[in-house]
Image (cartoon, rainbow, N blue to C red):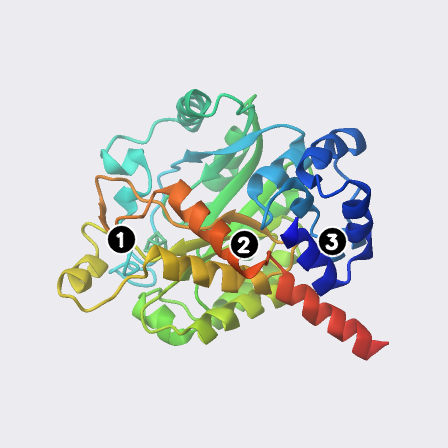
Amino acid sequence: MMRLCYGVVEGGQWIELLLMVLFCGQSYFFSSYFWLIFGKNLFFGVMSELIPFWRLLGHDYFPLGVLMRREFGCSVWKVSVDIGCSCPNIDGTVGTGGCLFCNTSSFAPSRRFREPVVSIVEQIDVGIRQLKRRYRHAQKFIAYFQPSTNTHLELEDLERFCRLALGHRDVVGLAIGTRPDALPEEVLEMLGFLSRTAWVQLEIGLQSIHQKSLDFLNRGHDYLVFRESFRRCRRHGFRLGVHLILGIPGESREEVLATAQEMAFLQPDSIKLHHLYVVRETPLEKLWRAGEIRLTTLEEYAGLVVDFLEELPPTVVVERIAGEADALFLLAPEWTGNKHAARNAVNQEFQRRCSFQGRLWLAKKKRQLIVDS
Ligand code: SF4
């Protein structure tokens, strides 16, 4: 309730005030019925920019689950699929060492256990069975081409894999993980074509806008490459997600804010935030064992996440707030993979500040409107 009040005062959002007064602050209870009765489109369009509607559902940021319910009307989960591709930063196209933190075996069971890559449909079936065991309410699924750089293969093969995944009876969409320098125009055209009839998202790993951080992480690309790829992708109509790391050694809070403000300017459809964690058999492991890097504590990281999200428009979906790693590979920090701890720390920080995603962005927008008028 307090947080809702703060949003009203800070953002001057009179509609939110009216709702709050009418329903005596029982926003969560009320909104469940509201959601069911009025359907998915009521608060979208112009309103969604000005009113963080997901706050009425009790969230401090716009989570993926809310987007999925809005888009598909049911609980939708991403099922990881390995299409067996390589990465330009490993196979010599761009570099051979890979990113500082990367061990592709830690991404997916198929790579972890050196299993032969089974068919796409088989992987989806197995993944769905596992997700349904874990989340009983899971109904539909997004096929997520996850490990490595999934646009780094022949166009015909990629298109065939995409169509196979989208043809699965329980799959309602497709997400493809890649890096910004592996996006030839013909791939974008193919994805743009698919997106006319299906939910398609490209997830681009950026990690930071700062060159010193990209160099430290051995990404093998600069920020301009990302900007150019992002601009080209936008012309094709599919959804765009961006992966970022907060807490990169040597990056200040101001530099994290600069990355957030750049994302606020670009407005991708979604972001995934990760902390820097150490997995086995990576160059980062050597630095960590030598005591040459310091990793963020959970409290520090939660502060950075909230700093970041306050600057981000309320329309950008937050798909992830911290990284995860398989226990077989994880070395540090020990809180990695504890989703509840990360979520609680972030929620507590939001509460401590009486804040929410987009609070500073909305305040700036309001000031701009006043100046313009
Ligand atoms: S671009 Fe992705 S797959 Fe390639 S080395 Fe970096 S993190 Fe690993």
- Horizontal arrangement in the rendering, residue 49 relative to residue 262 (left or right): right
What amino acid type should be assigned to the residue bearing mark 3? Ile
- Sequence-first disc among 2 and 1: 1
The x, y position of residue 89, in whole percent, is 32, 59
What amino acid type should be assigned to the residue bearing mark 2? Gln
Which sits in the foreground, 216 or 168?
A: 216
Residue 51's disc number = 3
- Assess disc 3: are there few (<14), some (14-19) or many (≥20) residues with their C-alpha within 10 Å of its C-alpha: many
Spatial CA span between label 3 and label 1: 36 Å
- Sequence-first disc among 3 and 1: 3
Quadrant where ligand 1 appears: bottom left
For discs 2 and 1, the disc positioned in front in the rendered view:
2
Which sits in the foreground, 359 or 114?
A: 359
Spatial CA span between label 2 and label 1: 24 Å
Tell me whether circle 2 and circle 1 mark residues in contact (CB < 8 Å).
no
The quadrant in which the C terminus is found is: bottom right
Q: Which residue is mark 1?
A: 333
Q: Which residue is mark 2?
A: 351
Q: Residue at x 40, y 54 (%)?
A: 274
Spatial CA span between label 2 and label 3: 19 Å
Residue 265's disc number = none
- Horizontal arrangement in the rendering, residue 21 relative to residue 70 (left or right): right
